[in-house]
Amino acid sequence: MTPWSPRGHIVGNYGLLALTALLFVGFSVALPDTFPTRENVSSILSNQSIPALLALGATIPIASGKFDLSIGYGLGLAHVMVMYLVVDRGTPWPLACLAVVLGGALVGAVNGAVVEFARIDSFIATLGTGSIMYALTGWLTDGSRIVPGPDGLPAAFTRLYDARFLGLPVPAFYVLAAVLVLWVVLERLPFGRYLYVVGSNPRAAGIIGIPTHRYSVYAFTGSGLVVGIAGVLLAAQQQTGNPSVGLDYLLPAFVGALLGSTTIRPGRANALGTLVAVGVLAVGLAGIGQLGAQFWATPLFNGGTLLLAVGLAGYAARRRLRTRAATDGPPPGGPPVEAAHGPTGGRGGGPPAGPPGPSAPPAAEAP
């Protein structure tokens, strides 16, 4: 039996957070006049708010063992739809924003239904629905930008992105609010526990009475809701409807979500881990940008970090399983997995009190 190592536990859980601090200190030493300034920190917080929201949206399906590759296309469609309603149709901006957010949730529900009831792999299904969203974006804009008139957009709408609170950009507080809500849902409510069970072992979840299809649809619906919110924020930032915007946000979002599953709660997609991972990416990209890196450094950094994130996510899941097996040991008689986590008496079984294991992304569906 392998003894539990407190040092290894701390490093595994908080190593990425320490790396963020080290990167910030390193770039501050290398760029003392520009990097450790209030203006630079505010710029990082503001610029990374939309990627952070998308990463949080991607985290929800990953917790259920699925992937939503349509989030980049959905972001593009959402922000174009806001501009279309406000500029072309004269819709009051609060109503337009509400319609887009609810529409995002509806699109997410459709994604979940296609995956669960049409039995199409989430990777393929969301890639297909994403392409349809991209086509709708092009149809709405006719391939050109939606530009407001001489009076511009309502000031109250643009303040959704431009305003400041306590000296910091308001979008940073949107991200913190989203992290708090997602943390409560996943870590403190039965919904989150059941979602982790579905992501860890859907067959066992079904045996003990969890409606796996329903929870998967819920996960995609939550992802679509967050994408809709991010689209509203992007429209307030860009103040134009650009049909080509959106795809560039997909890779950073998945890097953040997958890398986040290696920290705070290693082996499990979690909101705090995603926030830390986005922080690493934000500090790293800001630092290499100020050091004068070429334009190709950003996709190189994102792509390399994605490969690292997928590898670390798998390693964290395997390490967690080995640690649990070494600490607890197999129970006498070796009952089946579902018996260890809840009753298996068919319809009489109820949902488990907690997840049986990590909800690492399944290898077959890793992007």
Image (tube, rainbow, N blue to C red):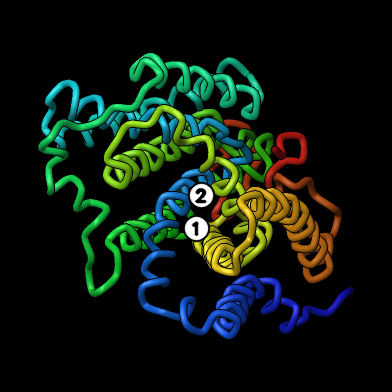
Q: Which residue is mark 2?
A: 55
Q: Position of residue 187 (x, y in %)?
A: 48, 59
- The Cα atoms of the two marked residues, 1 and 2, are separated by 9 Å
Q: Position of residue 285 (x, y in %)?
A: 57, 61
- Mark in front: 1 vs 2: 2
Q: Which residue is mark 1?
A: 271
Looking at the image, which residue is at 71% across and 35% down?
365
Looking at the image, which residue is at 56% across and 18% down?
117
Looking at the image, which residue is at 35% across and 39% down?
231
Secondary structure beneath disc 1?
A: helix
Asked whether residue 356 appears in the rendered view, the answer is: no
Q: Residue furthest right?
A: 1
Name the amino acid type tagged 2: Ala
Q: Which picture quadrant has residue 218?
A: top left
Q: Position of residue 328 (x, y in %)?
A: 78, 68
**Nearer the observer, 245 or 187:** 245
Asked whether residue 210 appears in the rendered view, the answer is: yes
Secondary structure beneath disc 2?
A: helix
Q: Earlier in the sequence, mark 1 or mark 2?
A: 2
Mark 1 neighbour class, 10 Å CA radius: few under 14, some 14 to 19, many 20 or more? many
Q: Which mark is residue 334?
A: none
**Nearer the observer, 337 or 162:** 162
